[in-house]
């Protein structure tokens, strides 16, 4: 249980994730058509509707590695943010 992460998910964070993980981003960098499909497929590992997302970093990173071009969830977030905000 040492690799479990707890991340508060505020309405602002939820909105930001929906803004950065566009359909275009998801189609270009993942095996999913959109962010909803990604969340649905990973629902066993993370409850996206909770006020706090608690997940095993190793398990979730493995899911990201298998279904995207990224090695980790953090890498995926960074790339989506960079693309959305022009870095």
Image (tube, helix red, strand yellow):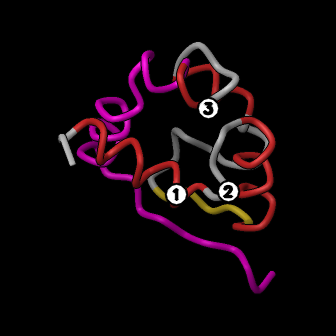
Q: Percent x, y for residue 61?
A: 71, 58
Circles 2 and 1 in contact, beta carbons < 8 Å: yes
- Dot 1 corresponds to which residue? 75
Q: Position of residue 30 (x, y in %)?
A: 63, 29
Give the residue at mark 2.
71
Work out how far the residue at label 3 is from the one at label 1, CA to CA, in angstroms: 17 Å
Residue displayed at 44% across by 16% down: 23
Q: Which mark is residue 43?
A: none
Residue 18 magenta-highlighted: yes
5 w.r.t. 25: above or below: below
Dot 2 surroundings within 10 Å: few (below 14), some, or many (20 or more)? some
Q: Quadrant of the N terminus?
A: bottom right
Q: Is residue 35 left or right of residue 1?
A: left
Query: Which residue is labeled 3 in the image?
Result: 39
Could you say where residue 85 lies in the image, as x and y percent from the top left? 19, 41
Disc 1 crowd, CA 10 A, few/some/many (<14, 14-19, 20+): some
- Considering depth in this image, is 32 or 55 the residue closer to the camera? 32
- Figure disc tally: 3
| Residue 16: % across, % down | 28, 40
Between the C-alphas of marks 2 and 3, the distance is 17 Å
């Amino acid at each position: 249980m040492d690799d479990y992460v707890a991340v508060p998910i505020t309405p602002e964070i939820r909105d930001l994730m929906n803004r950065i993980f566009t359909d275009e981003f998801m189609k270009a960098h993942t095996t999913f058509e959109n962010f909803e499909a990604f969340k649905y497929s990973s629902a066993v590992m993370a409850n996206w509707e909770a006020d706090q997302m608690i997940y095993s970093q190793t398990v979730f990173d493995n899911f990201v590695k298998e279904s995207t071009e990224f090695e980790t969830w953090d890498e995926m977030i960074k790339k989506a943010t960079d693309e959305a905000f022009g870095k």
